[in-house]
Image (cartoon, rainbow, N blue to C red):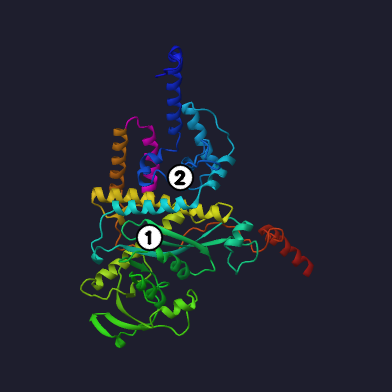
Amino acid sequence: MQTPFLPALRAVLAPMGSRTTKARQDLRACTLCQLESRFTPLLRPSLFPKAAAKQNSRDRIYTPWRTFWCFLWQSLNPRASCREVVRQLQALFELHGVGAISPDDAAYCRARQRLPADPLVQALSATARASDQAAPRLGFLQGRPVKVVDGSTVTLPDTAQNQKAYPQVSTLKESCGFPMMRLVVLFSLLSGAVLAMLPGSMYVGELRLFHQLMPLLAAGDIVVGDAGFGNFVALALLQGIQVDFLGRSVRQVDGRRHQRRLGPNDWLVRWQRSVKPSAILTPPQWAALPTELTVRIVRGSLYQPGFRVRQVTLVTTLLDAKLYPAQDLLRAYLRRWRLEMCLDDLKTTLGMETLRCQSPAMARKEACLYLIAHNLIRYTMAQAAAEHAVPIERLSFKGSLDALRQFSQALSQAATNRKRRQLWAGLLRTLAADLVPDRPGRREPRAVKRKSTKYPRLNAPRNQFRDPPKRNERRRNARLRGFVAK
């Protein structure tokens, strides 16, 4: 240590400087399973900048960067509470000798509330781009970017704020249901990563939410959707931004009234605009739509055991049969069926089906963190598929999540960067070797074998609900009725 002003104190100040540097390094090491050591290169370093004054301007334990990774760790570990995060940080601080922190989780909860929403959206987009870059390329549809639109719903805690923003289903009585949030997401067909997400109420249609997501599409993209999006309005709006569509048709198509035949069960037909204006468009927007569209109708068989639809009728704006053969269109839609499992991975494996935040703003942040966690797992799966030449569809999401959890603990204990690289290569080998079995004759209906609970549903407010009589009470009442009758 060089101190030209106090040379006599050099021997005293030098050890203090080394202790300060060591304490700073130990503080940086206090992270949950060292997740950021592997995934930080996917995100910009300036994602959560330090403010010059006021909020997030001081160096605290729960900095925005550490809070983001702790929140992400909760998403990767279903049912992990805020208290568990604080307990792990307590253990890590004690291990490195940095000092004690408060055992209360209130500071961490306030830090989560201070997290801005815009950096989370940027992190979601960055992780999706990294997953696409790591995944093997598509060999059909001319290599164009293919994006899948789909919708789902999640439940929120029953608070007054959540009920106001995302009301429960109208068929249930008041205080007998949970707030419902509708999500419309854009997936990448290449890697399965989530590109964008837009939440809304149950009383807002998926097509309206998709209309708000359209500015995120780029010219030359191909959008794949189900029957809820295969209508005249969606196709006309997408054509206006030079984006093609492929999906199920909501219209009854008569092949005998085709404009031109392109092949077996492959026609060009002309769609007329409806007389009734669309509810999602303003009058000027409705007037700007074309009065008719030339679309392509492809009818074929999707032999995929376990899925609901075998014979499908697809509508698309990809009119060139030479560049886009009918079999490639059916193949792309079949792969879209596989991406429906991404929503199941999010809701079942990661536990996103039931959010736990008490306010609408925090619920939206929680949903975004779940999607970022999903993208990081998809990024790991894409790396394994590309390096070991295995189909990404055969990789298990649940197996990848379990392996990532265990290997991340080993990564946090590795002493050198070389050992960490070896552990990561071992993780990728493990994922590539643990493929989902190919069961061509297996059928998987959408049904459950085990009932989730034996208790009845709450069909009245709690203060008015009366438990149904137990079996012994019913028998006793029956005996009393028989005695009175005699």
- Dot 2: within a 10 Å radius of its alpha carbon, few (fewer than 14), some, or many (20 or more) residues? some
Report the label total.
Answer: 2
Residue that badge 1 annotates: 187
Q: Secondary structure at mark 2?
A: loop
Instruction: Pinpoint residue 323: horizontal percent, then vertical percent.
Output: 22, 71
The answer to if 404 sits in the magenta stretch is: yes
Pick the residue in front: 210 or 384: 210
Going 39% across and 19% down the picture, which residue do you hit?
A: 2
Comparing 337 with 239, the one in front is: 239
Q: Quadrant of the N terminus?
A: top left
Give how far apart the Cα atoms at labels 2 and 1 are: 25 Å
Residue range in magenta is 400-416
Which percent across, then down, holds residue 330?
A: 29, 70
Of residue 209 and residue 474, the one placed in the foreground of this image is 209
Would you place residue 185 above or below residue 289 in this image? above
Type of amino acid at the residue the image marks with label 1: Phe
The residue tagged 2 is: 48
Report the residue that reaches farthest toward the front.
Answer: 5
Q: Is residue 95 left or right of residue 54?
A: left
Farthest residue to the left: give it.
Answer: 322
Q: Residue at x 29, y 57 (%)?
A: 438
Per the picture, the main secondary structure of the magenta-coloured stretch is: helix
- Under circle 1, the secondary element is strand
